[in-house]
Amino acid sequence: METFELLLSGFMQAMTPQNLLMAGIGALVGTFVGVLPGLGPTSAIAILLPLTTVLEPTQAIIMMAGIYYGAMYGGSTTAILLNIPGEVSSVPTCLDGYPLAKKGRGGPALGVAAIASFAAGTLGVIGLVFFAPFLADQALKFGPPEYFALMLLALTVMINLAGNSIVKALIMGVFGYLLSMVGIGPSSGMPRFAYGSNDFTGGFEMISIIIGLFAVTEVLKGIEEKRTAVSFGNIGSIYPSMADLRKSVKPMFQGGLVGFLLGLLPGCSAAVSTFLAYDLQKKTSKHPDQFGKGAMEGVAAPEAANNATSSAGFIPLFALGIPASPPLAVLLAGLMIYGLAPGPVLFEQNPKFVWTVIASMFIGNLMLLVLNLPLVGIWARLTRVPYGILAPVILMLSTIGAYTVRNSLFDVSVALVFGVLGYLLHKYRWPVAPLILCFILGPMLEQSFIQSMAMSAGNPLIFFKRPLSLSIIVLSVALLFLSLNLMRRTKQRVRQETGQQAEIA
Amino acid sequence: MKRNRLPLMLMIVLTGVMLVTGCSPLPSASDPAGQTAESGSGYPAKQIEYVVPFAPGGGTDLVARAVAEYLSEEWGQPVVVVNKPGGGGAVAAQYVLKQSARDGYTVMANNVSSTTMMAAGMADPPVKLSDHLFVSRIVEDPIAFTVKADAPWKDFKEFSDWVKKHPEQLTWTSVGPAGTSAFGVAEWLKAIGVDFSKTRMITTKGASDSMPKVAGGHAVLAVHSVAEVYSMAKAGKVKILAVQAEKRSPYFPDVPTAEEQGIKGMSVKWWTGVSMPAGTPAHVVKKWDETIAKMVKDPAFLKKLNNIHVQSSYLNSADFTRFVKEETRSYTRLATETGIRK
């Protein structure tokens, strides 16, 4: 009950005009950086860190938190309308969002994305309010073997992203994994595949690869097709129909739950949870053959997961001082600069601060919803801008985005090279999603494997001796067979209906 | 006629403004000190890029931001922190120390792991110490030997005795074989006479990755700087058995030092300072060093260090260079003995 009272007083504080303004600015800035490919919440918060010298701690942290969860909202817009994910975690949203937009249902898709984000974001904050210390303790039980098992589970998603050929998907997956290995090796501390170049020693940056494979590729595709505008015709009403909403309720909660649970685990990025949520939705759907062609559920699930993960990330941050992702690490820096070291001590010594920030997150989520539904109309107009104008703008933003992640020109060249590569892959129908999935999972898989081996002195049985990791491994094997089976059935069904080869992802 | 005069008036006004603003640097160039830009008074005349070779949010970054803020105010020119992470600091070092002009407008933050430990841990490091011009050391932070909160050992001595008996059961976390933790552990094991190669290293991505592993019982020991273990220790999820320093840490006055508990001969500490490319003009180095010497006495700056739980520990250019040389020698010996050096 005490929690509730504290929360209420937090709301009183958060409702002051200044704090409301900060939450609003944060949400707006977040939405914009989320929309722009490459310019993510990490760089946005880092750029704004010097503001901490001017603002009160509560106001600054409210604003930074707003940027963080606002970016998760914004990432979906360009993913749906332009097939360009603003954030890595928006990649699964492209899979069904863009086909929906092409069908003239971009409006409802954006609406569902905003509502799913709101529902899951709020769910996450409620989890933060009532279970923070308990959940943070549970997350600590996840050791390297459990992470390894979890990564295996996520790998099974690849089968569902395979499109028409598992072999092609596996080749792309291995390619993605190889790319992720460039740089300093996790156990040896020695550079791998560096060929004596300092840039290669630094490794490839995920964002620049995404920018290349999606944004630059999309521009090249547009030029080839001699597009005049990004999407033809209308995007439809921005308010989803009752039927759309009914379809989206289950994926919202499922996706939200998956995202929330994974968000508790430090280092498990939002990209992993969105892929898993999308996959889970497809597996439990009654019509999996619709996925990849414009299923509303395929937008709702990853968007919900995305925002639940970002809210849940505050739990290990506030309760233990562990940042679950790079933007939270910068947010932690903001807290440290004010001398507010997170942990239970923070809850005891500065309850007013903590609860005001938490209350502002409720308000911020609501603001984002209110902000985003009308904004959808503006974004929609974006798609009618002549392609001759939009294409160079996308290229310019891509270049800036790729550069700002690490302030490195090398990343810009990487984006351009991968843009051409992505265009060729698209032309010859090689799926890029497995490449990205393995690029994300590869380093986590390797690191948790090596950590587990160090724990067990090289005995691989460690994965089967621990109940938690054993159950996840059993689950992954089961899912693998389920996926294979599902894929066979889907292919059959598509062939029956259309007499054509299936093109799923 | 009147209409025609307007553009003319505008032009005159604009030219006037341009003349005035264009002339304004002149008085300062001939100010009482009577020095030309070459001998130093002109620096800094524009924005300075202060490169941090690690991601935002870490210790090196937080200190660099505090420094940048002070210098910006002091010099009236923006000192902008730019993060260029990657390759254990090699990417940023390549940019600042090798590719940038040696004019003092591109400088970098360094720390123990990107300098002495890299030189000691790698026979052929991507950045050589000779590429650095060491300007000043600013901050140091003792390392803390940290175990799970409900671990059975009540102090560092008891823990060391346990390790002596069961070296093969000791797992410890580190970002890699040449990380601060690895050197800290190696030095401690040497001091208590345990074979380093019998223990096992669990590589992690850094403190935010390794602290939950120790708190959850997946690894026995984490050795990080006091600032890095602060939150989890205050949260009661881990306990600090000892800090390695001459004096106890002001942030954990109840935790005894390693030496107090009878373990002598340890020296590993985390520190951070400023590097410039070798060949930077001496007056620029002097300007930085003098301003930093002043900064570490500034109460507002010290308050900031207090907030991020580190301690000021200034060394001037000459002392810093000597310190780095000595530390490299002792770390190289340690790394060679333990097989860390590759």
Image: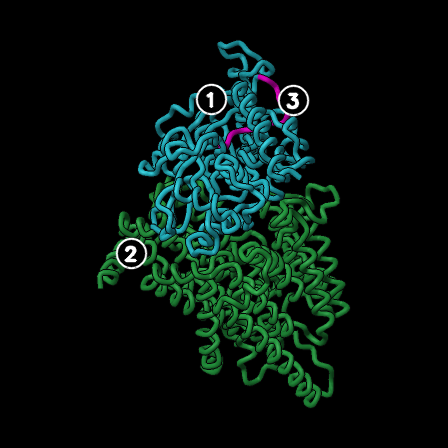
Q: Do the residues indicated by labels 1 and 2 lie within the same chain of the protein? A: no
Q: Which residue is mark 2?
A: A15
Residue B23 seen? no
Q: Position of residue A181 (x, y in %)?
A: 67, 53
Q: Is residue B67 above or below residue B294?
A: below
Which chain did the renderer colour green? Answer: A
Chain ID, mark 1: B
Q: Nearer the viewer, residue B168 or B307?
A: B168
Q: Quadrant of the C terminus of chain A?
A: bottom right
Q: Which residues are magenta?
A: B271-282
Q: Is residue A308 above or below residue B314?
A: below
What's the residue at 65%, 35% (across, down)?
Answer: B95
Q: Which residue is mark 3?
A: B279
- The amino acid on which the numbered mark 3 sits, given as a three-letter code, is Gly
Q: Nearer the viewer, mark 3 or mark 2?
A: 3
Q: Could you tell me how far apart the alpha carbons at marks 1 and 2 are, in whole angstroms?
A: 43 Å
Q: Could you tell me how far apart the alpha carbons at marks 3 and 2 are, in whole angstroms?
A: 56 Å
Q: Which residue is mark 1?
A: B291
Could you classify mark 3 by the number of other residues whose Cα lies within 10 Å: few (under 14), some (14-19), or many (20 or more)?
some
Chain ID, mark 3: B
Q: Are marks 3 and 2 in contact (CB under 8 Å)?
A: no
Q: Do the residues indicated by labels 1 and 3 lie within the same chain of the protein? A: yes
